[in-house]
Amino acid sequence: MSKRRVGATPKSNSLPIGRSKEDNNLLEALKLYEAKSYKKSLKLVDTVLKKNSSHADSLALKALNLYHTDQKDEAAVYVQKALAKNNTGGPSPIGYHILGIYMRSEKNYREAAKLFQTSLDNGSNNKQIYRDLATLYSQEHDYKNLLIARKAYWEEFMGYRANWTSLAVAHDLNDQPEEGANVLSKFEELAKGRLGEGELYEHNECLMYKNDLLYRSAGESSEKLQRVLEHLDEIEGDVFDKYGWLERRAAVYMKLDDKQSAARVYRILISRNPDNFDYYRLLEVALGVQNDDKLRKILYTNLQKLYPRAEPPKFIPLTFIQDEEEYAEKLSSYLLTQVKRGVPATFGNVKPLYRNDSERAPRLSEKIMLEFFGTLNPKEDPLVYVWSSYFLCQHYLYLKDFTKARDYIDRALCHTPTLVELYILKARVLKHAGLLVEAAETINEGRLLDFQDRFINTKTAKYYLRANLIEKAVEVVSIFTKNDDSANGVMDLHLMEASWFVGEQAESYYRLYLESQQKLVEAKASEIPEDEELQEERTAHIKHLAYQTSKYGGLALKRLHAIAKFYKQFKDDQLDFHSYCMRKGVPRAYLEMYQWGKGVFILPMYMRALKGAAKLYFRLHDEQLTNVNHESESNDGKTPVAKKGNKKAKKEAAAMKKRIDEDKKQVTALEKDDDILGEKLIQTKTPLSDFTESFYANYAELIADHHRDYALEFEYQLRNGKLALALGALVKYTDLRSIKNSVVGSMLLSLLDRVQFSAGVDEMTKKITLKGIERHFEFLPLKELVNDDFDWLKYYQETYPEPTLDALLLLRRSCMRIVDRDLIKQLILTNLCSQEPSVQDYVLKYELS
Amino acid sequence: MVKSPVNLDAVYSNNVGTFQKIANTVLPVKYPSKFFEEQFDDKANTTVFAQLGYFGEVAVGGVRAELIASKNGGVQSAGVYIQILAVLEAYRSKGLGTALLNYIEEQTKSHYQHKIFVHVAVDNQEALEWYQRKDFRIEGDVLPNYYKETSGSPDAYVLLKKV
């Protein structure tokens, strides 16, 4: 029944009978191309082109062959040539198909889809194109065309189950679940009794998928929901996913308001997996006890008896018991059983309680644990003693009492210095206390205990990166990487798309960039000494710092760009799955991936890279604005003393080159890279559009309104000179938070600053923006804008008496003239007193420089 | 029957750091890293018996002993010499030391040896008593200035057990 066809794109013979010699040759060449004999194919195409240089199909095939023989630039030229022939006859359907394949290889999926479509529209009878077309439309989320393509392909090749499944999914994506279910039903009828053993899994997945479709199309109609239940009964024997089957059953009962039956199913689910919290919550709802703590308590007491080893029945009561005495008792038994058993994650387990019950939970847990700790003899129950101190350290760390946290972790380490977890925790405590180098050394001490432990290896690398000790980090992490052709593991980590490392390294380079830039500024400002030798020394020093600054900045951008690339890759990699998942018969898993794929550019790591890139590019942008007038100064680094003997200069240049080569070896991240140090990236003249192109556009396209980071958007548009859009972001930000939020105040002042002083924005925009501000923020004393003596900072302080650190930093970053930046600095310093040491440190070192 | 929390396992080049940590925490003598790595040097022509002692799943003790060939170059060996036997303070009196020593005794027997030697600093009362409880006897006189880099006494006794 379901024979499966594997990939490749054969082209059928779609040319008229009286074909020309050129077309004959082309077909020959195509065959060679398909056999991957690109060079031979190229040769043949060239002979055609020699006689007829405007044969569009040959041009297209030449491009494709060039593409596969690593001559991508030339390939692009020939594609343009082929396309330009559009009006003079143009490529044949085959030609368009070839061009489409080229575009697909170039990952330009939209264009590829267009070309495939043209090929079909121009009379290609190669029906395989529909399948490729469908994958492209899937990739581009063009559901309407997807359905058309899937249908056309299905009509041609009904003998494959994959095509039926694909068609059903296409219906589903077009919000036609019922049609989808019908398609699947028809196939089931056809396949009845003819399924081999190897197809049973696929069959089970498709059955459950059909149930999904029925369930979704049922809505609230009880008649249809009954039908879903009946269907579940029908397929029970064939379904392997018993959890899914039961969960669906319970969900249908809930919708039908048959709570008793639902509760029965949830109890079955709990008995199958008593550690799934969701089932308990749903059982509560089914029983209708979710708001009655008394009944809930009885429920969980019973469940605990039934499942004495399960976690949820013990934990959930802690989330609702009001009576303090009872709560303390429950908490105590919960905590102590775990600590006595030496469960390392005990604190992690109660952390949700700390968060939701922020007064009572920490207070009581501290009391319980201290009392218990007091009764312990470190020699009688050594492990209990260690894990209790471990818990207490985490407890105090959570409360930001670093002294006590350190005290407990030191006790534990003194007692059992061979436990790796203790080093990790101590490093965390030190990190929060702002002692980054000590933290890295501590965790490294733990790493030395066990070289096989990959977890602590990566943690150590991360801590070294936080401490800006990049070389050490690379040395440590390289123990676990493949380092065949490179000096260290950096290249392998890029190949493995290890964003955790690449991202941390980017941030580390960024900090080093700021540090050396600061030093460079200081060195340039230093007095030029009289003595010639000292003068030379100073010049060399400046040269060195300038190189460092450019290197670190370049590498920071290089790494950030690498992350953007990883995520682009995640998106592109989905292409193969649109057909693969159908052939494998896993539509449910496929749809899950498909939904995930929509959000790759808002995943946390991408966001982190995006924000990191924003910081650096915004900085470059701001620097360019202020530096326009000082351009000539930048030559300061070059020898003011006239060239004194070419020999010496040559020697210096050679030393410098050697150093750069050595650096390059250490940081090479990609094969065949012509900008290893990211020099081209950092020397950009257009930082904002670089940022948009490589980072922001992808994000802005994907993000839903309520997830959007309006603070970031505000800063972006502000620098872009799009003040109206910046105002738009500000208004949205205000809607989501409150008008009293101090960040709103900072944004307002920044906007006024631009309106008032920015030379790069035209008067019309300024006026519109001002009008907008007036409308949305009536309370602002806008008439004072003409008054030069008005103290806006004082106004800010009065309106926002307790500004957050973020608000103040934003104010300092974005206001040029409206308020005195030194005064803001003072405010920031005052604010820092109430911050955690690690934050203080960071801001002092990197934000205020 | 409750499973005993005490277990032994070999020392590997990957976790020799743990062994080093235990030795340097418990003993007043500081051993350099080189000493510990030596065990994994294929060229070194010595027979070493080493084990880590685990309590629960935490390594808290260790032993390392060497087979000493006879001085006169014959086939007979002089015996087994315990270089390090250490258990973290909090984990003593739980049978770890005994287990580690038993291991050495087994190795001694299976290598057809009859003597186990150990040096103990003269001021290390706890260890002296412990070894004597395990049927070790002081052999000969005090060795003056036996330990070089130590925070305790530099003088040592030689203890011997015949098996």
Image (spheres, rainbow, N blue to C red):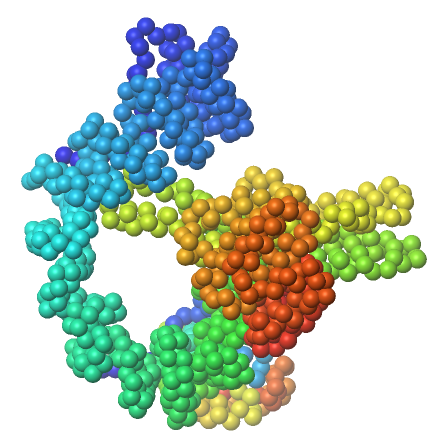
Which one is in front, A516 or A415? A516
In the image: residue A777, left or right of residue B145: left
Vertical arrangement, residue A129 with respect to residue A568, above or below: above
In the image: residue A429, left or right of residue A826: left
- Rendered location of residue B98, percent (x, y): 38, 84
Quadrant in the rendering for residue A246: bottom left
Residue at position x 70%, y 57% in the image: A517
- Rendered location of residue A446, percent (x, y): 50, 71
Residue at position x 53%, y 43% in the image: A693
Which one is in front, B82 or A190? A190
Which one is in front, A734 or A160? A734
Vertical arrangement, residue A339 with respect to residue A249, above or below: below
Q: Is residue A434 visible?
A: no
Which one is in front, A356 or B105? A356
Q: Is residue A235 visible?
A: yes
Vertical arrangement, residue A762 with respect to residue A751, above or below: above
- Rendered location of residue A462, percent (x, y): 52, 63
In the image: residue A639, left or right of residue A66: right
Residue at position x 45%, y 18% in the image: A86
Residue at position x 35%, y 41% in the image: A141
- Rendered location of residue A85, percent (x, y): 47, 16
Count of numbered circles on the image:
0
> The C terminus of chain A lies in which quarter of the figure?
bottom right
> The N terminus of chain A lies in which quarter of the figure?
top left
